[in-house]
Amino acid sequence: MTREIEVPIPSDSCGIQRSRIIKIVGVILTLPIWSFFVWRNIFIHPHKPRFTLQDVTLYNFNVTVDPSSLSSAFQATIWSRNPNAWFGLYYNTMGVYATYENQQVTSRTEINTTYQGHKSEDLWTVLVAGTSVPVAPQIGAALNQNWGNGVVVIMIKLDGHVRWKLGSLAKGGNHITVLCPAYITFGPNSTGISLGNNASKYQLFHNCDVNLSK
């Protein structure tokens, strides 16, 4: 007489459980790496702000050759934008002034500490001026020649410090330098719009060069 013995089939629950454990461990191991790259791309490398020199109103521009000096007064309208979706910006100790051939030719006008929110835009109107500012003889000669030729390129420069704000956390600051070229034309070919009292407004809309450093 033959006896049949049923052998129980091993349950696969152990294998399923082991597979789940492996997946969980994999997620745990990859999560810090993924978090690091997100933190690195968002927190360490926010995008620098953008600036555009919209217009310049010229109130005074007088070149003296001997001794070499320049008297000038400009009102600059500067558009700024924070392109970051996660970061706000604090502009600290920001100053605006004009330069010619890398030499400062006006006094520095300070801008009050300003906060710029995510994807926000601001319009700054700043007056810079200088009276009988001495310039190097070779710069004075070049300035006088360009003035006589009907076009002078003045650089409107901003510099100061910027801090990044993520939620309630403010990240350490960077030094910011913004260079905005202003092409000022004179004489019969001038592109300026007369405002009376020897004032002329120049519509420019030139993008500015923005540099960040530690």
Image (cartoon, rainbow, N blue to C red):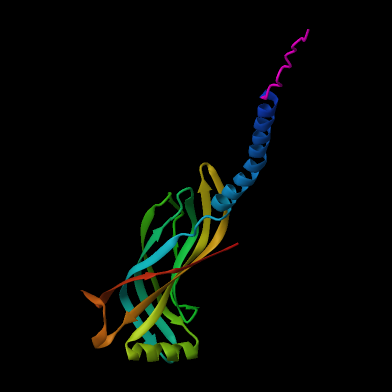
- Is residue 184 or residue 4 the one in the foreground? 4
Asked whether 35 or 185 is in front, the reply is: 35
The x, y position of residue 65, in whole percent, is 41, 91
- For residue 2, what is the image quadrant? top right
Left or right: residue 103 compared with residue 27? left
Q: Quadrant of the N terminus?
A: top right
Snapshot quadrant of residue 169: top right
Is residue 105 found left or right of 213 in the rendered image? left
* Residue at image coords 29%, 84%: 186
Residue 8: within the magenta? Answer: yes
Locate residue 8, reporting x and y percent: 72, 17
Residue 78 shown left or right of residue 7 in the figure: left
Q: Is residue 80 above or below residue 133?
A: above
Q: Quadrant of the C terminus?
A: bottom right
Q: Depth check: 144 or 206 in front?
A: 206
Q: Which segment is the magenta one?
A: 1-12
Residue 188 location (% of width, % of height): 23, 87
**Image: 43 above or below 126:** above
Q: Is residue 159 magenta?
A: no
Q: Main secondary structure of the magenta part?
A: loop
On the image, the x and y values in percent for residue 204 come to 32, 72
Residue at the image point whose x is 67% and y is 25% from the top: 12
**Above or below for 167 versus 182:** above
* Residue 101 in view here: yes
Nearer to the camera, 89 or 13: 13
Q: Is residue 196 visible?
A: no
- Rendering quarter of residue 143: bottom left
Q: Residue furthest top?
A: 1
Number of numbered discs: 0
Give the residue at x 49% y 49%.
Answer: 87
